[in-house]
Image: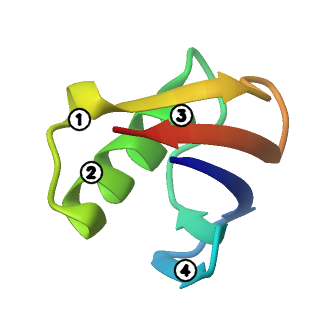
Amino acid sequence: MLYQVRVEFNKDFVDVNNNEITVGVRSKPIDGEANKEIIKKLSKHFGVSSANVRIRSGHKSKNKIVEII
């Protein structure tokens, strides 16, 4: 399933509304650290392995398309 994900920095939460998700991350967007935190939070929230969460587009953007298998 594909989700539109919006990222907010310096916060710590996951808010799911239909197929739109807002994620708060504490990591800085350096060397992919924020993306790793997003994948970890979404995999925990949906109860799947982090290997089943993939950022399809928006790797360097606050707005991303994420696929969860």
The residues bearing labels 2 and 3 have C-alpha atoms spaced at a distance of 12 Å
Tell me if label 1 and label 2 are in contact, CB under 8 Å.
yes
Q: Closest to the observer: 15 or 1?
A: 1
The residues bearing labels 4 and 3 have C-alpha atoms spaced at a distance of 17 Å
Q: Mark 1 — residue?
A: 50
Q: Name the residue furthest top.
A: 31
The residues bearing labels 1 and 4 have C-alpha atoms spaced at a distance of 18 Å
First reached walking from the N terminus: tag 2 or tag 4: 4
Q: Position of residue 69 (x, y in %)?
A: 34, 38
Tell me if label 4 and label 3 are in contact, CB under 8 Å.
no
Q: Mark 3 — residue?
A: 35
**Residue type pointed to by label 2:** Ser
**Residue type pointed to by label 1:** Ser
The residues bearing labels 2 and 4 have C-alpha atoms spaced at a distance of 13 Å
**Residue type pointed to by label 3:** Asn
The tally of labels here is: 4
Nearest-to-viewer mark from 2 and 3 = 2
User: Residue at the location (72% across, 23% down)?
Assistant: 59
- Mark 4 lies on a secondary structure that is strand
User: Residue at the location (34% across, 57% down)?
Assistant: 41
Nearest-to-viewer mark from 4 and 3 = 4
First reached walking from the N terminus: tag 1 or tag 3: 3
Q: Residues within 10 Å of mark 1 (few under 14, many from 20)?
A: some
Specify the label residue 16 is tagged with. 4
Q: Mark 2 — residue?
A: 43
Tell me: residue 30, above or below residue 21.
above
Q: Position of residue 42 (x, y in %)?
A: 37, 56
Q: Position of residue 49 (x, y in %)?
A: 14, 39
Which quarter of the picture shows residue 37?
top left
- Mark 2 lies on a secondary structure that is helix
- Mark 1 lies on a secondary structure that is helix
User: Residue at the location (62% across, 80% down)?
Assistant: 18
